[in-house]
Image: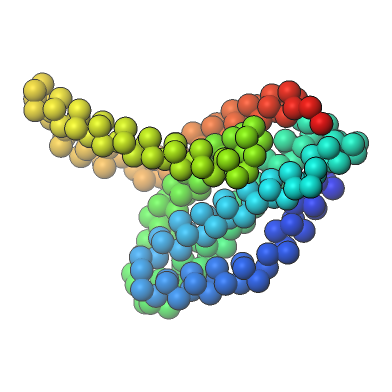
Amino acid sequence: MKGLLIKDYLTIAKQKKLAVLYVFVAIMLSFSMDSSFIVSYFSLIGSLLVLTTLTYDSFDNGYPFLMSLPVTAKTYVYAKYLFSFLGLLGFWGFSVILQFASLILRKESFEVLDVLSMDVTFFPMFLFIVGLMLPISLKFGAEKARIILIVIFGLVFVVGIMGKKLLETAVKDYHIDFETIIKKLDAMPQQVVALSLAGLGILAFVISMKISIGIMKKKEF
């Protein structure tokens, strides 16, 4: 597994010029946009970069070569998910440091726990996206996976609009006090919400890993 992790790290390291560009753009935007943008921006970049390792693995019959080594399908999936988790965590952690640096330089007042609680909600969200993309990429390939992801998000958007209309109808017809429900949700401690989302994100990631193991075991190399 160590060799697979080093391979993925070197794959990302080859894109260091692109990473420097991302950092420069983030620093520039941090002075004109909300500080939380830095965290969401870097988490997205981290998600995309860790997924590029799958493209390199599948290039030029890469999978048959990897499976010819003393590597099992399960070990490959474990390594890929561990690298994705650590990679995303690294990008997220770096973005949090940049965010606090931006807040200090802009001389904005802030509560450390409140900012961190908001930041923690970003990590499971992008962890869920990576967990969604990995099994799709392993099943259909990285290029098709991007198209499938766009379709999925499109469907989520449509379902969201329809759900909003249905909710508005339910509130009107059944006299649901929706504002009271929102106030109760807002009254919940941010730390509790953040930890709950983190737990759900990790659970979804583990389920995704189990699915990916099944996909890799069925592949013929």
Question: As rendered, which of 189 and 74 lies closer to the eye?
Answer: 74
* Residue at the spot 46% in from the left edge and 43% down from the top edge: 150
Q: Classify 72 as above or below 173.
A: below
Question: As rendered, which of 105 and 38 lies closer to the eye?
Answer: 38
Question: As rendered, which of 178 and 171 lies closer to the eye?
Answer: 171
* Residue at the spot 51% in from the left edge and 54% down from the top edge: 44
Q: Is residue 221 visible?
A: yes
15 vs 45, left or right, is right
Q: Quick one: quadrant of the C terminus?
A: top right
**Coordinates of residue 154 in the picture (x, y in percent):** 38, 40
Question: As rendered, which of 179 and 184 lies closer to the eye?
Answer: 179
**Coordinates of residue 195 in the picture (x, y in percent):** 46, 40
**Coordinates of residue 43 in the picture (x, y in percent):** 52, 55
Q: Quick one: quadrant of the N terminus?
A: top right
Q: Classify 104 as above or below 34.
A: below
Q: Classify 112 as above or below 154.
A: below
Q: Classify 62 as above or below 24.
A: above
* Residue at the spot 42% in from the left edge and 40% down from the top edge: 153
Q: Quadrant of residue 30?
A: bottom left
Q: Quadrant of residue 207?
A: top right
Q: Quadrant of residue 158?
A: top left
